[in-house]
């Protein structure tokens, strides 16, 4: 049985702990510096540790003896927590979408005796596994389009959006340069550009460039695909309001103020839906073909507790990665990218099943 330390006892950390604890294959300890988060974790029955994630030496001492460390902490703590896990001799996994943080983890992995595997959530994470799987279905790959969105089931404001995830991470996605492959070459594209409209199951959506969702897939597929893109899914009209706020009003230069606006004006919700919609085109047996993957996930009950769709899909991504390393289906040391995970193997884990559609609760139906 592996002993796992989850650094970050917030909503996603709690869902990860519940999934791992319910499996019977893992012992879980939750670590944080926030006394309220630790009190909540202890109330749920988890052993807790008070830690300062900004102190790598002290954190390494605390992490010694754990088989693996999962960072569910803010993205800017990624390098420190990864370095501490490496020093403690533990495998390391995280959920970051931050490109600089991932590069720091990659550098640490060069001489590591354990696994360092960042970007294990939804996007980056599961969507990279799906993208690599689709790419492998073609003799010659032409285009690969990855689209992911976490959306409220019942949008009521002009943005048609509620907070379901880290506000800092959300603003990074909207403001930072985006990776893509265009005409076979890796490039940086502007966020909020390449706007598209599409429909699924009778509902209208839009999507546009955002940062971080591709993970390392651009590097892996360079030279193998003519065009690769990642876009975030929202309800129509969201992108135009964002451009007003970020560009016209200049809030892209005041991310602190943007965070305050979002957290003051946009309520949080656990009544959400996560959509993963990926499409690839290319040649197979000399014929131009197209293949798509669609997954829509709702909230679920796990261990007697209801979790939102974004909690479930994010936690399932990292728990599945941990399980594949533990079972020897992934390398046992060094840097491991999401596209090294085989989609059928991931879906066969007890955590991959959480990507099956959830259920709308009676409360959801009445809302």
Image (cartoon, rainbow, N blue to C red):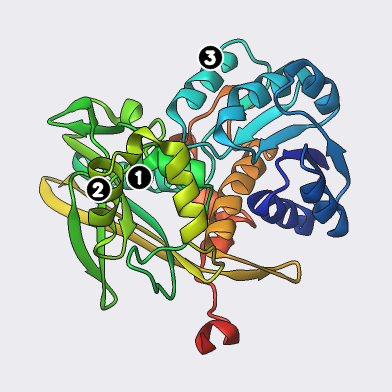
State the residue at coordinates (53%, 19%): 104
The extreme top residue here reads 111
State the residue at coordinates (68%, 22%): 114
Find residue 21 and report its image quarter: bottom right
Task: Report the residue marked by disc 1.
Answer: 131
Give the percent coordinates (x, y) of residue 198: 20, 64
User: Disc 3 vs disc 2: Cβ atoms closer than 8 Å?
Assistant: no
Q: Is residue 163 visible?
A: no
Find residue 138 and report its image quarter: top left
Give the percent coordinates (x, y) of residue 74: 59, 37
Give the percent coordinates (x, y) of residue 323: 66, 44
Q: Residues within 10 Å of mark 2 (few under 14, many from 20)?
A: some
Dot placed on the residue nearer the N-terminal end, 2 or 1: 1
Dot placed on the residue nearer the N-terminal end, 3 or 1: 3
> Which quadrant of the figure contains the N terminus?
top right
Q: Nearer the viewer, residue 346 or 74?
A: 74
Task: Report the residue marked by disc 3.
Answer: 107
Mark 2–mark 1 distance (CA, rounded to whole Å): 28 Å
State the residue at coordinates (58%, 87%): 362
Q: Residues within 10 Å of mark 3 (few under 14, many from 20)?
A: some
Mark 3–mark 1 distance (CA, rounded to whole Å): 25 Å
Task: Report the residue marked by disc 2.
Answer: 243
Dot placed on the residue nearer the N-terminal end, 3 or 2: 3
Mark 1 secondary-structure assignment: helix
Q: Nearer the viewer, residue 74 or 66?
A: 74
Mark 3 secondary-structure assignment: helix
């Amino acid at each position: 049985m592996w002993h796992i330390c989850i650094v970050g006892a917030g909503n996603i950390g709690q869902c990860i702990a519940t999934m791992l604890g319910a499996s019977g294959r893992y012992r879980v300890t939750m670590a944080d510096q926030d006394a309220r988060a630790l009190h909540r974790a202890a109330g749920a029955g988890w052993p807790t540790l008070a830690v300062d994630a900004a102190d790598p030496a002290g954190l390494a001492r605390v992490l010694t003896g754990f088989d693996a460390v999962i960072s569910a902490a803010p993205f800017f703590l990624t390098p420190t927590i990864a370095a501490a896990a490496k020093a403690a001799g533990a495998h390391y996994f995280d959920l970051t979408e931050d490109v600089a943080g991932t590069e720091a983890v990659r550098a640490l992995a060069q001489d590591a005796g354990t696994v360092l595997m960042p970007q294990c959530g939804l996007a980056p994470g599961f969507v990279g596994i799906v993208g690599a799987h689709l790419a492998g279905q073609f003799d010659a790959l032409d285009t690969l389009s990855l689209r992911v969105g976490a959306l409220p089931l019942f949008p009521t404001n002009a943005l048609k959006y509620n907070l379901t995830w880290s506000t800092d991470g959300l603003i990074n996605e909207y403001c930072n340069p985006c990776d893509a492959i265009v005409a076979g070459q890796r490039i940086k594209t502007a966020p909020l550009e390449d706007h598209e409209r599409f429909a699924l199951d009778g509902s209208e959506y839009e999507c546009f460039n955002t940062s971080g969702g591709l993970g390392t897939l651009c590097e892996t597929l360079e030279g193998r695909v003519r065009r690769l893109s990642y876009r975030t899914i929202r309800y129509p009209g969201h992108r135009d309001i964002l451009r007003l706020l970020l560009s016209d009003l200049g809030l892209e230069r005041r991310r602190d103020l943007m965070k305050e606006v979002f957290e003051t004006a946009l309520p949080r919700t656990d009544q959400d839906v996560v959509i993963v919609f990926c499409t690839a085109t290319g040649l197979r047996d000399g014929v131009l073909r197209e293949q798509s993957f669609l997954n829509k996930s709702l909230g679920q009950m796990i261990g007697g507790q209801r979790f939102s769709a974004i909690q479930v899909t994010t936690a399932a991504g990292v728990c599945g990665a941990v399980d594949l390393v533990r079972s020897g289906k992934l390398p046992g040391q060094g840097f491991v990218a999401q596209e090294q995970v085989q989609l059928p193997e991931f879906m066969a884990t007890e955590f991959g099943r959480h990507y099956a559609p959830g259920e709308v609760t009676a409360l959801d139906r009445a809302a």
